[in-house]
Image (cartoon, coloured by chain):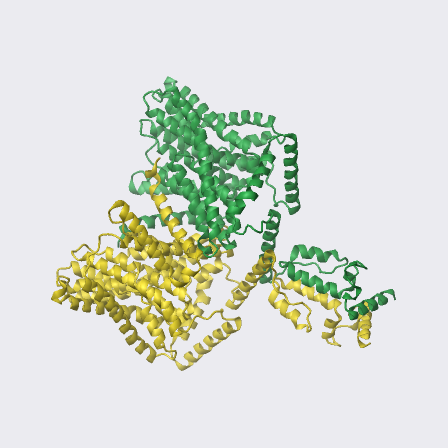
Chain colours: A yellow, B green
Amino acid sequence: LDYQHVQVPFEITLWIMLASLAKIGFHLYNKLPSVVPESCLLIFVGLIMGGIIYGLNDRSPPVMDSDIFFLYLLPPIVLDAGYFMPSRPFFENIGTILLYAVVGTIWNVFGIGFSLYGICQVKAFRLQDVSLLHNLLFGSLIAAVDPVAVLAVFEEIHVNEKLHILVFGESLLNDAVTVVLYKLFRSFCEMPTIKSVDVFAGVGKFFVVGLGGVLVGLSFGFTAAFTTRFTKDIRVIEPLFVFLYSYLSYLTAEMFHLSGIVAIISCAMGMKRYVEANISLKSHTTVKYFMKMWSSVSDTLIFIFLGVSTIGENHEWNWPYICFTVIFCLIWRALGVLVLTFFVNRFHVNTITSKDQFIIAYGGLRGAICFSLVFLLPDFHRKKLFIAATTVVILFTVFVQGMTIRPLVDLLAVKRERESAPTVGEQIHIRFLDHLLAGIEDISGHWGQYYWKDKLEYFNSKYLQKILLREYDQPKSSIVLLYEKLERKHAIELAQAGQLGHGLAHPSFLSSDRTVITEQKLEDTPNPDALDNMQEILARNLYRIRRTGPAYNRHTLPGDSEPSERAKEILILRHKSL
Amino acid sequence: LDYQHVQVPFEITLWIMLASLAKIGFHLYNKLPSVVPESCLLIFVGLIMGGIIYGLNDRSPPVMDSDIFFLYLLPPIVLDAGYFMPSRPFFENIGTILLYAVVGTIWNVFGIGFSLYGICQVKAFRLQDVSLLHNLLFGSLIAAVDPVAVLAVFEEIHVNEKLHILVFGESLLNDAVTVVLYKLFRSFCEMPTIKSVDVFAGVGKFFVVGLGGVLVGLSFGFTAAFTTRFTKDIRVIEPLFVFLYSYLSYLTAEMFHLSGIVAIISCAMGMKRYVEANISLKSHTTVKYFMKMWSSVSDTLIFIFLGVSTIGENHEWNWPYICFTVIFCLIWRALGVLVLTFFVNRFHVNTITSKDQFIIAYGGLRGAICFSLVFLLPDFHRKKLFIAATTVVILFTVFVQGMTIRPLVDLLAVKRERESAPTVGEQIHIRFLDHLLAGIEDISGHWGQYYWKDKLEYFNSKYLQKILLREYDQPKSSIVLLYEKLERKHAIELAQAGQLGHGLAHPSFLSSDRTVITEQKLEDTPNPDALDNMQEILARNLYRIRRTGPAYNRHTLPGDSEPSERAKEILILRHKSL
């Protein structure tokens, strides 16, 4: 037996296997996932596993390594989120999302930090050794809403698109703020004196970290799109480039201390459109499937590790500090959402209702990012207290808020996601209105979102597409692409229905009125030519269809139809009249 | 800048990126891959990169880590090979393959080992310090044909299926022999005295290593198939299980010192059939695509690393030893193939022609496995000589033999691969003949391959399918599955043709004779129901089709058809008689 030799890959494979099997297990009982969110169940599995390890070894189980989390587990989830981000609602609400993500997070950090510092001044609590800076540092890591936790819960409750994108977008974009504030306070903690220059430099860093991330992401995204122009002869490695370039964008951003999450999201959103046009259909299926698979496994592993890491002896319990942390997290988030939404609503026609505000505030879940950050703290005597408080906040938000949010959404009758995809008609109208609004904005001299969108679209079709797309000579409108997609989907459905032996319920081709034939032609057949042919046969043989043609036509001679057919028709007509 | 933090994933990603870009680069010039095999080009790129690294750093570039090769690069290639192995020709020629793989490899090991020892006795060559055991150890690592190199070359030259499976099957299955002999001689080298018991134990080990690998592989394969029974609700992680279980089988086999290659091949071949039936179509596309992608990247990386590792100062040059190694490798392989084929041909009706024998001998390429094994040798004073000899043999076989084998195949007019897949008719006949032969073998009391195949098939449908398949209640014959597959493929093609605006050239549905309709029904329509419907309409309305039905039927009343239709028919018939 030579276990040492294969240990690393063997244990990684086993952990992934455990995660996958746990996922299968939950889905075997259909009722379980509808009551308890998967994230709670996974943390629970992790707690049990941690307990077993603790019981067997009699020492704390290994905690989730922050490096493993940030380098290997987080990127797939964020990539998936960015790649499948619905770009229209995201860009429509980008202002509100940024306000929540930047101002809201700063508000939370300072709110929680200062009020906890207030608590620390109460002598009875024995917390006077926790300085203001340490409290602010703790605030900076505990304030940020976690995308992984939010995604896990919000994917199951199906609230309306706007509400979803507000919470989810905030959780993604606040990474830049968290990175800056966390690193700022951490370096302040280690500095002997803090100059006002440092504080101003910190403010400037926001823009560098955020915009730098966007820049890194977009440049890698466009490079990826450009690379897939040349993969026509080796389709099989196409999916690789999507993963490689987005991962490189994340790593590069992290290397330069920029926001990796912002970078990978920009990369995914930037490349998606061009890559999809360049790569083959099967490659695209593989990309989508693998992204979902990977993020789903990462997500599972994160929650299991979260559970495992909770067990152990690295906690210092202090009732007041921990309880007040939970309370302040809730209060400051609620206040922040209320105040910010008040300003947002003043400038928007589509206001955020008070129900939506409640769900936004209540959906501010904390997760593995906080957990990894708290373990990355430099060693100081109260680190274990911070770890305990963070663990409690995460478990509280994931378990209590995560499990009650679905009943609350039902109870409040929050507007749900629409069930069906928009029809082609709707899509054409939306597009038409966009153009109209862009024109109106241009005339009125107001440079709003429609104006910029129009300009961007122009720049895209004028320059970017020429560089990044392989078959540029045939630019297809998205309506044509949609039609192709529907046609393809339908063809596959038809084949599957045939193969399953059920068959689709087809109305008779020739029911009372003849319009059915035309409808059938549009809806049901994959090949228009074949149906044309068929209709021709029917038309040639069925006298009723012949009658729909004009009785007299300038350009056709009456002798075109065969005499025998005409005779037949006359005979039939005569028969009818009997 | 914090490079340390992201170094490991960043460098891995960059290497993979380099490999992928190199692959794209070669395919940009269409003429290049048709002249030079990709493997040669990749080694060449590796040599250049190694030269650059050597020039810049002024020290040897890092050699390919044997652990990385065996744990991460080799498994994807072997998995791909096993999963896409054409099982019929493989099992039809399993006897010949095993003969080549076991007896042939042993013949080569001892032939090369002893004759090199003979060379070492020549005083002028100054090699007298290389003992017989060391020569045999060297023989054991240099004798084995390399699956990666064989695959890279033979995939491009398209020889006939039997020839391909003989060379490729041998290269895969000789792993068990190589593992045993290599480890045996290595332990003999370290032992003070060798007892005859040890030699016999070594012989026994062959069976343990080979059959143990098969056993480990099959058990993981069946577990994988069983697991995919329960993934109906989470399709997205289905592909994962295929990869996880096969990788675990490889690692487990390596852990117990069994043949990992044999294990992963058994696992892939064992699970394929059941997994394909259980998982969704998209999951299956992802599995196939990702397997191909992964193996292609691994393959590229191996050849690049091979090139990089060649540059450096870890070689000891000795003209006679190196030249004779190359010559003996060629001679002993040619002799082995000749002798073994003589015996094989005596017991087979389908003999291996002398052209085929030449290609089998000439296609015995060496590759990265030898290279990794030679670096794994324990340190002794002539290790650098062995490294140099191995490098030369690999480069010689890959460059000289790899580049000339295609012209030789053309020159000798070796029977090529058939271009088209077998028709449904052929497949039915093959199956029918199989059953017939199984029956004949049973009657004659001869337990040949057909008898065992039939028994295995019986066992499979009686027990295995019930346990491993999700929807067992509808067991489908492979003809039905093939029909479904063709139907699906056709539906997609129809949709794509429709979308491209070309349309397929459809013959008229109702040309002179009516059989066309039936043919069309079989060939062209994705949904049989829709066509049934259509035919019904046609039958109802076209008097000619009506006439094909029986004029009188016991079970139907003549009143079944509507009076108006009957009248119409009579009228038409009357018209005809005019």
Quadrant for the C terminus of chain A, please: bottom right
Is A237 rendered above or below residue A410?
above
Location of residue A115 in the rendering, given as x and y in whole percent from the top left corner: 19, 69
Location of residue A61 in the rendering, given as x and y in whole percent from the top left corner: 27, 49
B257 relative to A577 in the view: left or right = left
Q: Residue furthest left?
A: A123
Judge by depth and name the residue closer to the eye, A285 or A6.
A6
Occupied quadrant, residue A217: bottom left
Location of residue B81 in the rendering, given as x and y in whole percent from the top left corner: 49, 41
Judge by depth and name the residue closer to the eye, B390 or A84.
A84
Is B309 rendered above or below residue A307?
above
Judge by depth and name the residue closer to the eye, A23 or B9.
A23
Location of residue A415 in the rendering, given as x and y in whole percent from the top left corner: 41, 73
Q: Residue at x 15, y 59 (%)?
A: A191
Q: Residue furthest bottom?
A: A444
Quadrant for the N terminus of chain A, please: top left
Residue B327 in sight in this render: no
Residue A204 in sight in this render: yes
B496 relative to B514 in the view: left or right = left
Q: Residue at x 70, y 55 (%)?
A: B519
